[in-house]
Amino acid sequence: MRSIIAIVLSAAALASCTPESGSNADVTGSIDNCARKLFSQYNPKDKKQCVAVCIACERGVVVTCSTACTLRGAQ
């Protein structure tokens, strides 16, 4: 009985987690505006541009921005 309760509580806890999805995380659009100020033709798939925007607009650091851009598909 306790294991069933534990499973139900675990499932409820996991169901309440919602991951942020890419550009939807920025509700105000401020990161997009910042990216356009840095690059007139911003390409999020260009790793150099992605890292530069992450550092400047999202206040990231090189290591985390590089990893985030790679996970988003930048090359």
Image: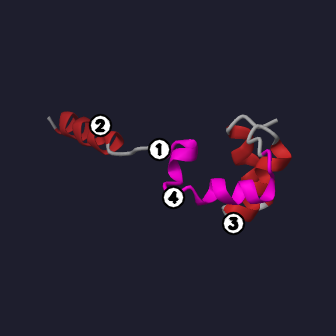
Residue 34 magenta: yes
Check contact, mark 4 vs mark 2: CB within 8 A. no
Amino acid under label 4?
Answer: Thr
Could you tell me how far apart the alpha carbons at marks 4 and 2 are, in whole angstroms?
32 Å
Which numbered disc flags the more N-terminal residue, 2 or 3? 2
Which residue is tagged 1?
A: 19
- The residue range painted magenta reads 20-41
Q: Residues within 10 Å of mark 4 (few under 14, many from 20)?
A: few
| Picture residue at 82% right of the left edge, 43% below the top | 47
Which residue is tagged 4?
A: 28
Which numbered disc flags the more N-terminal residue, 1 or 3? 1
Outermost residue toward the left? 1
Can residue 54 be seen at all in this image of the molecule? yes
**x, y percent for residue 40:** 80, 50
Amino acid under label 1?
Answer: Pro
Q: Is residue 61 positioned above or below 17 on the image? A: below
Q: Identify the secondary structure beneath mark 2.
A: helix
**x, y percent for residue 24:** 51, 46
Which residue is tagged 2?
A: 11
Which residue is tagged 3?
A: 59
Q: Nearer the viewer, mark 3 or mark 4?
A: 4
Q: Nearer the viewer, mark 4 or mark 2?
A: 4
Which numbered disc flags the more N-terminal residue, 2 or 1? 2
Could you tell me how far apart the alpha carbons at marks 1 and 3 are, in whole angstroms?
20 Å
Outermost residue toward the right? 48
| Picture residue at 30% right of the left edge, 41% below the top | 10
Left or right, residue 72 beside residue 75: left
